[in-house]
Image (tube, helix red, strand yellow):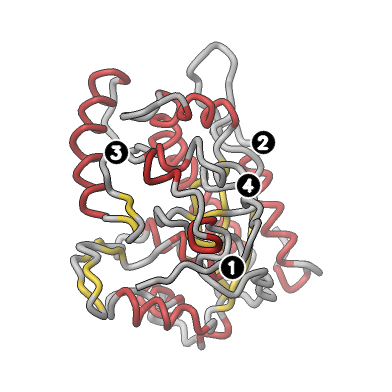
Amino acid sequence: MKSTKQIKDPANWLETIVKDYINESPENVFKIQEENEKIWEDPLIGFSNGNDPLYQEYKKHIGSFYWTPVEIFTKTFPQIKVSPDQLTVISWILPQTEATKSDNRRQTHVPSERWAKARKYGEEVNKRLREHVVALLKKAGHEAVAPFISPLFEMKATTCNSVEYHYASTWSERHAAYASGLGTFGLCDGLITPKGKAVRCGSVVAHIQIPPTKRPYHDHHAYCLFFTEGSCKKCIKRCPAGAITEAGHNKMKCYQYTNTICVDYIKSHYGFKDTPCGLCQTDVPCESEIPKIRKQKRVKQG
């Protein structure tokens, strides 16, 4: 493996690593039927600098426990002295297949088998992809950590700035993706990307300097029809838990529904335990693309 110092374009090198793993790895298959059907489609990749002010904003908004890139890196590698601007956050989007989305569109209360298996087995693929990226970076001479699978990763109960989140994590893959130019948030809190909202995210923090991906937006709700023009709200109707309203996403209602109704159904019908739902990510205008904004009428937030 070459050192990245000898690689003319580290961004392209890393993009190729992520895309090749998903598009060519024999692990990225459902094994539901005789033919090996892919779990994830061709990924999107973006980059953000460890010194991006957004990461400090996240910390202020979510809680003091929330990691900036330099915090999780130095917690992992206390022997390495590094400044935030010497770090890059590598972020990717894994889109669901059309077959998975089609199955879940027909559901009204619980996820389809494909969607549930994409959550369980697809996230195992995502975990191995994080490990793969970290390993290749290290081999090329750059220490790296995948925060979401770090043994230090935690969920925390929190109330910050008078907003009760009930619980939040020490790192958010969706927020890393937003900072890396890959998408903005919808009314249900899902990330709307150029491949839509029916996706999963992954990220790695690395001691490598790569130019950040330009963010083609200036607002964290720029791609959501409700916030831009006051229309849609289809995710409200799609949510079987009643967890989405015009006020936003109630994480506790969502959590309680997925950890009881969905878990019981998946265990009894599909034979394993997991907590997906995904109904708000399918059969909505932002399922597979950024919806077209017809009028720029901002909805008041507060």
- Which residue in the protein does label 1 denote? 180
Question: What kind of element bears circle 4?
Answer: loop
Q: Is residue 47 above or below residue 290?
A: below
> Which residue is more in the foreground, 25 or 194?
194
Q: Where does label 4 land, which residue? A: 289
Q: Position of residue 193 (x, y in %)?
A: 59, 54
Instruction: Tell me the crowding category of disc 2: few under 14, some 14 to 19, or many 20 or more residues within 10 angstroms, Cα based.
Output: few
* Residue 223: percent from left, percent from top: 57, 59
Which residue is more in the foreground, 2 or 255?
255
The residue that disc 3 covers is 275
Residue positioned 32% across, 20% down in the render: 270
Q: CA distance from mark 2 to mark 4?
A: 24 Å
Which residue occupies the extreme right position in the image? Answer: 8
Tell me how far mark 1 sits from mark 4, CA to CA: 18 Å
Based on the displayed image, in which of its 4 quarters is residue 211 positioned? bottom right
Choose mark 2 or mark 4, whichever is in front.
4
Is residue 300 or residue 210 the one in the foreground? 300
Give the total number of marks visible in the rendering: 4
Instruction: Give the distance between the C-alpha atoms of the residues marked 3 and 4, in whole angstroms.
Output: 25 Å
Amino acid type, label 2: Glu
Please state which amino acid type lies under the numbered disc 1.
Ser
Q: Earlier in the sequence, mark 3 or mark 4?
A: 3
CB contact under 8 Å: marks 3 and 4: no
| Residue located beneath label 2 in the image | 24
- The residue mark sitting in front, 3 or 4, is 4
Residue at 50% across / 49% down in the picture? 232
